[in-house]
Amino acid sequence: MTLQRRVLLLLLVTAPLVWAAALAFSLHRARSEINELFDTELIRLARQVQATLPTASLHAIDGPADAASSTQTTPAVTLANSGEADLETLSIAVWDRQGHLLLSDREGVMLPSRPDASGFTELALGTGQWRAYYLQSASGQWVVAAGQSLHERDELMWGLVGGQLIPWVLTLPVLMLVIVATVRQALKPVTELASEIGARPASDLRPLNDATLPSDLKPLVRAMNTLFARISTALDRERRFTADAAHELRTPLAALQAQWDAAQLDAVSGARDADGKIGQSLARLSRLVAQLLSLSRIDADLGAAGGSASTPTTSSVPLADWPLLAEQAMSDVLPLAEQRQVELACEWPNDREPGASPPAGADAGPAPLPIRGDPSLLAAMLRNLLDNAVRHSPPGGQVTLRLGVDSVAVLDEGPGVSAEHLARLGDRFYRPPGQGGVGSGLGLSIVTLIAQAHGLKVDWRNRAERSGFEVTLKKV
């Protein structure tokens, strides 16, 4: 069910209910006002009759007063039959102390004598339900009763309400049509927005224009624009990754092809040299593919997290366990370090001995660089830093992972990097000239990407106290 149909259904069901409730309330109020009006008239009539009784000469009568008997008794009785001025639904009767009927109109004879009655009471007479008011005289000499048929009150009530009910009934269908037209007009921006989005091709990720939309729809459109921007960024990232991968894979594959062709042409003398070159190319290709896959996974993870470049602060993200991360990273790099005869060392915060791990079950001292983040990403960052440092350190050199209270640093004893190339470190597939090995220029790019996602600043510089290179990570 669409939103428009849901709103229409609710309005078309509730509007008649509200209309019926208003009608019932109007009937109740009309009945109350009419009862109050006629009750007041009954009281006034009874009091007026009682006020004239002391000056009237009344005698007991046996039945209803007619025109003949009225002229032979008293003027008060003759008033009971006055032609067209008579009200058939209004009656008056007077009894003496003994219960003898002294005065009545044509309908008054139906009222029962109640010597002790006082106030209003409802009676069931021959013509229907009546409401009567009994008034005792101060001396107890007379009892006056004024009555009225309830049918007269109901007829007046329905006459008053009916004058309003007919327009209400006639305007209810018009009201329904107005509700339908109003809802459709009010939801027209939603329909237009849905049509605009549905007509777009899959490649059109331009932001939607919310200048003319109602304020209720603007948060939705802004959220959709944010989603479009994230999708566009993810697509650009995938396109860039594909282009970079195609460009970088072309070189080792072309070298493999050339070396294979050379080995085919000189199967004897050049076989050994060609095999060695092919092995180097395969190693470089293997490392390149591994780093491309790692870079793609990190891009995907950061893209799913919204591409945030600030330190995660939510309590659901764990604090970095640097001892465990350092142990994992150094274990991964240890085979390469042994192959290249490079020593790995780890330094903890100031109050610990260099190369010593925090004692189990004891006071661990100040924690290194307390940040929250993804353990797998932080481990990949340390692994790439150590791997890069080991590959650029000479045999017999040392690579140090220094964990400080407010920083993490990796130091090597390699030749360092010239000042003109320091600014480009961290760019994808960039390697300073003159470097050998099987690197592809992605290791430091991965480090930069992970560091920015965790609110860390990467500082590259040559070591001041000796030859070598130093990479330092600090909070922004």
Image (cartoon, rainbow, N blue to C red):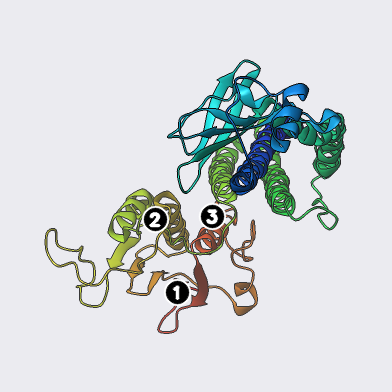
Which marked residue is nearer to the observer: mark 3 or mark 1?
Answer: 1
Q: Residues within 10 Å of mark 3 (few under 14, many from 20)?
A: few
Query: Where does label 1 land, which residue?
Result: 468
Q: Nearer the viewer, residue 56 or 230?
A: 56
Vertical order, 473 against 65 (above or below): below
Question: Which residue appears at 72% of the width and 34% of the height?
Answer: 19
Whole-Å distance between the Cαs marked 3 and 1?
A: 18 Å
Query: Where does label 2 land, which residue?
Result: 340
Q: Secondary structure at mark 3?
A: loop
Q: Is residue 40 left or right of residue 362?
A: right
Point out the tag, 2 or 1, that comes first from the N-terminus: 2
Q: Residues within 10 Å of mark 2 (few under 14, many from 20)?
A: some
Residue 123 in sight here: yes
Work out which residue is located at the far left of the displayed protein and give it: 361
Whole-Å distance between the Cαs marked 2 and 1?
A: 16 Å
Identify residue type, mark 2.
Arg
Query: Where does label 3 land, which residue?
Result: 437
Q: Is residue 396 left or right of residue 105?
A: left
Identify residue type, mark 3.
Gly
Q: Nearer the viewer, residue 18 or 334?
A: 18
